[in-house]
Image (spheres, coloured by chain):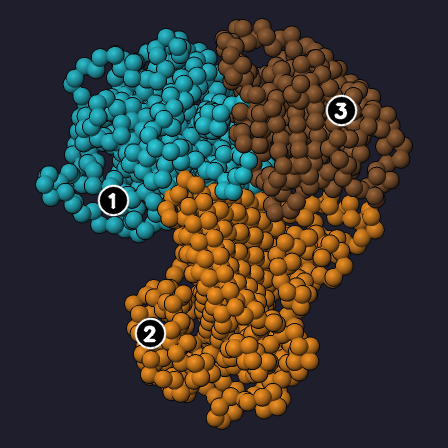
Chain colours: A cyan, B brown, C orange
Amino acid sequence: MKSTLTHTAPAKPAPPGPLEAFERFEKRAGHAGPPWLRALRTSGISYFGELGFPAAHHEDWRFTTPSVLAERAYAPAPRPDVQIPGVASLSLVPDGELEAHRLVFVDGHFAPRLSRVLPLEPEQVVTNLREALEFQSSLVESFLGRAARHETSAFAALNTAFLEDGAFVYLPAGRELAAPVHLLFVSSQPGVVSHPRVLVVARAGARAQVIEEYVSLGEQAGFTNAVTEIAAGPGAQVEHVRLQRENGASLHVGTVEARQYKDSRVLSHSVSTGARLARHNIHLRFEEPGCEGVLNGLYTGAGDQLVDHHTIADHRSPHCQSHEFYHGILSGRSRGVFNGRIYVRQDAQKTDAKQTNRNLLLSNEATVYTKPQLEIWADDVKCTHGATVGQLDENAVFYLRSRGIGEARARRMLIGAFASETIGRIGVEALRARLDETLQAWLAEELAAPGPLPLPHPPGLTT
Amino acid sequence: MTPLLEINQLNATVEGRQILKGLSLTVHAGEVHAIMGPNGSGKSTLASILSGRPGYEVTGGSAALDGEDLLGMKPEDRARKGLFLAFQYPVEIPGVNSTYFLKAALNEVRKARGLPELDALEFLEFIKAKMKVLELDPSLLNRPVNEGFSGGEKKRNEIFQMAILEPRLAILDETDSGLDIDALRIVAEGVNRLRKPDNAQVVITHYQRLLDYIVPDYVHVLHDGRIVKSGGKELAYELERRGYDWLTSEARPVSPELTTA
Amino acid sequence: MNTNNDTIQGLVGGDYKYGFVTDVEADAVAPGLNEGVIAAISRKKNEPGFMLDWRLKAYRHWLTLQEPRWANLRYPPIDYQSIVYYSAPKKAGQGPKSLAEVDPKLLETYERLGIPLHERERLAGVAVDAVFDSVSVATTFREKLAELGIVFCSFSEAVQQHPDLVRKYLGTVVPYTDNYFAALNAAVFSDGSFCYIPKGVRCPMELSTYFRINAANTGQFERTLIVAEEGSRVSYLEGCTAPMRDENQLHAAVVELLALDRAEIKYSTVQNWYPGDAQGRGGIYNFVTKRGLCKGRESKISWTQVETGSAITWKYPSCVLLGENSTGEFYSVAVTNHYQQADTGTKMIHIGRNTRSTIVSKGISAGHGQNSYRGLVRIRKSAENARNFSQCDSLLLGDRCGAHTFPYLEAANPTARVEHEATTSKIGEDQIFYCNQRGLATQDAVNMIVNGYCKEVFKQLPMEFAVEAQKLLGVSLDGSVG
């Protein structure tokens, strides 16, 4: 599955290949941080060298051509020297509405002056990863690179090779993080890549909410290759929100890898509205009995956007539950890809796994590819999945109409509700409200587009 | 006086099968009519046809509300004109908040009646009183429409919507099915309170039980797509005693005059 | 679950009853594949030049292909040079003219298989074309069908007697370029069935082919072609068995169906090739390409399969819905026990407006069996108002087996409705107990539940096949089966 890295842009000078970029990066950053980090990065680049970018016919990349990504630069963006005015206003949630620890990263580099950490309880950590690597090296070492599988994922490997800044959230046993952590990743320079890394560790019984928000400054193309690792100890609960709203020229690859231990809960939300090409890999892995995982997501596409979610709920232990809800709304010429996998390993008896993926196409040019997938090796399990494309419940449409609501409005209401349903599961209220508002406005605009409302309509209506 | 509802020789098919075969019925303002009949006689089809449910094809006859042709109207226009159907199986609509839904519906109906729309505060004021009558848990309003409602809650919610939309003609489709006796009484009381000289109700039911609580002025027996017998409320008791067989075995259409009050 | 496991063995693990070998002298070519072998096959069958050309083109194309490995199947490499590509019961000259000419030993074989041709003839319900190893042995009811203009004969005969029809339709639905096994089949196929239903004719009886692999080290590469002209209708049944042998045998068949305007083809299969023994030794490798083209408007193609045999099953009977208002259906029961593996499902390609498809797949895994459903529903941009509904259920009997679902749904038209549902379940102890409490033995309860689970598919089968299918599941007729 190796692919040779050929550079195809004849007009522009070829961007440096990843291996070359790594050499330069090593020279600059290699001496900083603990020795084990250097080894980790080196293993990252060597795995990447072995894996290469996934080939176009790779099953996991059938619809999201990785060659677009392979043509990009790999070197981390230089630290921007421009002062960015009002970074906080880039967030969907205005500063005053969300009381949160806020760490801001510009082109992958931590921006301390734009960040603020609220008072923490003893032993709790919310900090730039680089700082933690320096001062809490052994603590970080126990968790970093343990969940993300850079052995098998080229993008995780690449991120690991260039690992530097990012967020480190650590919660000792039994403590709840009072305020959410809000991580804002701003892409400001065109044609460069950032490899942000987030590590969230919640020890036994701890609770935390972490929001990652990805935005762009300006309209030029950037490339974000983010990796998040979550470790949820026994009885811990982590709610993780991934909000991808980069500009329409950007490329975005986001990976979330969670390891769950006894009776823990991880709630993963992914809302993806931005980027020209967005690929999300979200994996929950139940290592011990009694875990619960929620995979909740909403993706929207317009214009030429391609948005791709690959999720895995990996049941490796008995008595675990996973609930997955992904909704997609696609308009323009956009393409939506969903691949949800449920693995139930041989020992994972009494698994309860549910998955639904529903899609609405709002235009004649939009396409959806969905592949809900079950792989089961245990017999005493309850697993269901369902996927639908292109339908509003006609009974619901009729019910609304029978109460006097016009047909077009009835359909708009139901599409709005379709979007709200996933948003409604997000536990951070301020964010939920803003998101819903933004999405409803987007929908109103998409549905107001000229031309007939291309919504499903059963044939043969006579009354 | 123009009748509120006038159905004349209505014929209708569902998926190519003829269900209504020349049904005629006239309802004036201030009246309550009960339509009874065995399973499969066409009772629910009548409700669906009148409310304009897709998939039902009218192949002959007419139906008018306040003298206006009903069958050519879109379902929402029928609702705005004052036709209300209390569904036998109210559908669950995940994600659509009940309050939002009701306010949208009410304002559509008010607009059609030339009344000003209500803002959020006025609306809440307006519905508070109506909730009490039906002993509805106010928290239901914060839930999606009908989602997770019990059977009784769904039926009460239908009548609650009826109270809010104040229809000219309400059709209650097997509203008693699935209700215990207490819930039945609450629903019936709600319906009775809504009875006014300028509106009318058509109660579709299989059993006489509901008619102890909602007392009809007229009772019609529907069989094989037509009304085969009409009478006063005492007909319901006779049906309760004798069943439907004595009527259906010699089923024949009666003339429209007989069914007209 | 111990009690259950015992009954499950009884249920799907019964001894293979069709594992006998018939001792007939065979006319075979030497093992191996090259252009000479292909020419020899073509020569033995006395084929016209266009057939040999086509075979050679297919062979040359095959040489450029790699064996597909994307399926969820594990098996050692197949040595294509050790396979015998042609084997026929020795009977010099041409095929038998009537049943009287058929080798009595062969007839006895079919008798043991449960398809006595004589009896069938009397029953007047089914016309059987039996393929033994690679050649068609007897075709019943020829004359009766011929009166209606229906052609139903072995493929070899069709090549001799209806070369124009063969030339016109061969490879139009499954071209030799389609996939690795289809290319191999096109190069070496030795026989199969051919069926042509003229315009407006409703075939008055079920047409049936029975396939059997008898000789050792023999590959069976049959090819079936059914053409249903405008307004015609046909129901076709296919059954398969093979003797028990320790080594694996390859079966790579191709079935092409073509339905023109308002034509309807119903194709039912009960596949009971030898599955290998309880330790996973031996068994048929079944790599089959089946596709139907609904070319005409309002045409309909319906696939029903009951897959209980074979060590490896790789099979995706598909429908290309080109004609407006055309319909495709796929009903499947697939059982894997011991070390059997199945990767099976369907493809529904919606191209025309108002096209409809239905998929019902029931997988049953027991022992160490691995059962995968793999299906594609593709709604092309042109397929206005297309509808698909898929239901894919898995039943797991025991904790060493696997059930996997790989549905691919692709929709490029906003008026399309695609719905996919899948569930995985086991037979609940509470269900068994409930039945026990009502007086049913555990075995009967399991039979009843499994039958109920498969009912939706069984009811698609013609009566005799439904019975056979149920027998194959070791299930008595009582209980919930209708």
SS at badge 1: helix
SS at badge 3: loop
Depth order, front residue of A253/C174? C174
Instruction: Give the chain of mark 1.
Output: A
| Category of crowding for the residue at label 3, using alpha-carbon neighbours closer than 10 angstroms: few (below 14), some (14–19), many (at least 20) | some
Depth order, front residue of B231/C343? B231
Same chain, marks 2 and 3? Answer: no
User: Which residue type carries mark 1?
Assistant: Ser
Q: Position of residue C239 (x, y in %)?
A: 58, 71
Q: Which mark is residue C59?
A: 2
Q: Is residue A55 visible?
A: yes
Number of on-image labels: 3
**Residue for badge 1:** A67
Name the mark nearer the viewer: 2 or 3: 3
Instruction: Give the chain of mark 2.
Output: C
Who's the residue at 21% across and 26% down the image?
Answer: A219
Name the mark nearer the viewer: 1 or 2: 2
**Residue for badge 3:** B261
Q: Position of residue B248 (x, y in %)?
A: 81, 41
